[in-house]
Image (cartoon, rainbow, N blue to C red):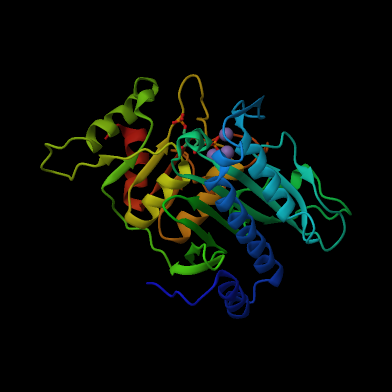
Amino acid sequence: MNNLTTTFNAHLWRQHRLSKQPIEISILLTQMGFAAKVLSREISRAALVGRLGLVGEKNATGDAQKKLDVFSNQVVVEAFSDIGLVAAIASEELDQVQLIECGQDAQYILCTDPLDGSSNIDTGSAVGTIFGIYRRSSTGYCSTEADALQPGTELVAAGYVLYGTSTMLVYTTGDQVDGFTLDPTLGEFLLSHENIRCPDQGKTYSANLSYYQEWHPHLQKLVDYLGDHKSTSHAAHTLRYSGALVADVHRCLLEGGLYFYPSTEEQPLGKLRLLYECAPLAFVVEQAGGLATSGTERIMDIEVTSIHQRSPLAIGSAAAVKLYENFLEQGM
Ligand code: AHG
Ligand code: MN
Ligand code: MN
Ligand code: MN
């Protein structure tokens, strides 16, 4: 349903009044909206200002950092540095938790993947930003790394920005999931997808099939089952894999479907990071009626022991995620 007169900020104010959640959460989300506008502009003109290509460094998880990875991280950190509410930030592009502010007002922790899908950036395909917001768990004057090591169930807000054919911001604070589309002529995110519900079934699955030979044999059977276009017992799924988790999960959220990035022998916990990729997206998808699992455990329940901890991930339509879990366990 389009409601093109509701700005993101007006929606946040109304949501604060109705839900009685702290106004600070609305302020934090407003700042995320601001960072998203800056990144939408800067991503679209990166080629014009020399911001494509590699930095020549690797981040803590071994990813080759793109110039836009580092720049996006700076934009997000700066957007949250002067508002006095954020105690610390955990980011894919920061080796350690970055202390932002001490004192009683700074009660929130931001976990972020500032640029998701950065392998797409030099060729103009979709990329995203993922964010999750926690309340501090420590009581001291300054925050500690432990404040960022909270399971997804402790998230107070989470969401993502998709820089695609349009720039969309999708978020939840635990009530419902709402989507906003940026009108660049106004510089405003306008409510375009109110109360998103994830269909129980979908027609697509997203996975990097080049790893098929390295997956658990039961998951190879799942792929064979999903891609069986001759079956009369179930509808086959079409493969759609963009290289950006945010874009593939967004498709599952709106149209139903399944994204999975399983473990392999080389990467027993898979590739994706729990704190700033899997858990925030799991919060959004679950709030929309979908599911998110490691294959054996609900993503939101997984204990976080390090900020760059990885987890296998299967996320999307409830029926599809349950099918994934059944296949992984029983091979059928
Ligand atoms: P990031 O660019 O933030 O490092 O994330 C990349 C992730 C995810 O966005 C995507 O689905 C996946 O890595 C792609 O991995 P493969 O290239 O191994 O398929
Ligand atoms: Mn990366
Ligand atoms: Mn990512
Ligand atoms: Mn990233």
Q: Nearer the viewer, residue 293 or 258?
A: 258
Q: Is residue 312 above or below residue 302?
A: above
Taking the spot 64% from the left edge, 60% from the top edge, the residue there is 34
Q: Does residue 260 appear to the left or right of 84 in the view shown?
A: left
Give the quadrant of the N terminus. Answer: bottom left
Residue 102's spot in the image, x, y percent?
Answer: 86, 54
- Residue 153 visible from this viewpoint: yes
Q: Position of residue 101 (x, y in %)?
A: 83, 53
Q: Is residue 177 above or below residue 244?
A: below
Q: Residue 169 versus residue 304: which sits nearer the camera? A: 169
Q: Position of residue 51 (x, y in %)?
A: 61, 37
Rendered residue at 51%/76% (across/down): 6
Residue 134: percent from the left, percent from the top? 67, 55
The extreme front residue here reads 48
Residue 264 quadrant: top left
Q: Is residue 131 above or below residue 269?
A: below
Q: Is residue 87 above or below residue 278?
A: below
Question: Going 32% across and 58% down the picture, which residue do you hit?
Answer: 199
Say left or right for 270 vs 32: left
Q: Quadrant of residue 209?
A: top left
Q: In the drawing, does residue 286 fall left or right of residue 157?
A: left
Q: Which of 34/252 is in front?
A: 34
Point out the image quarter for the C terminus. top left
Direction from residue 127 to residue 38 in the image, left or right? right
User: What is the count of numbered marks?
Assistant: 0
Tell me which residue sits at (48%, 65%) in the image. Answer: 178
Residue 302 visible at all: no
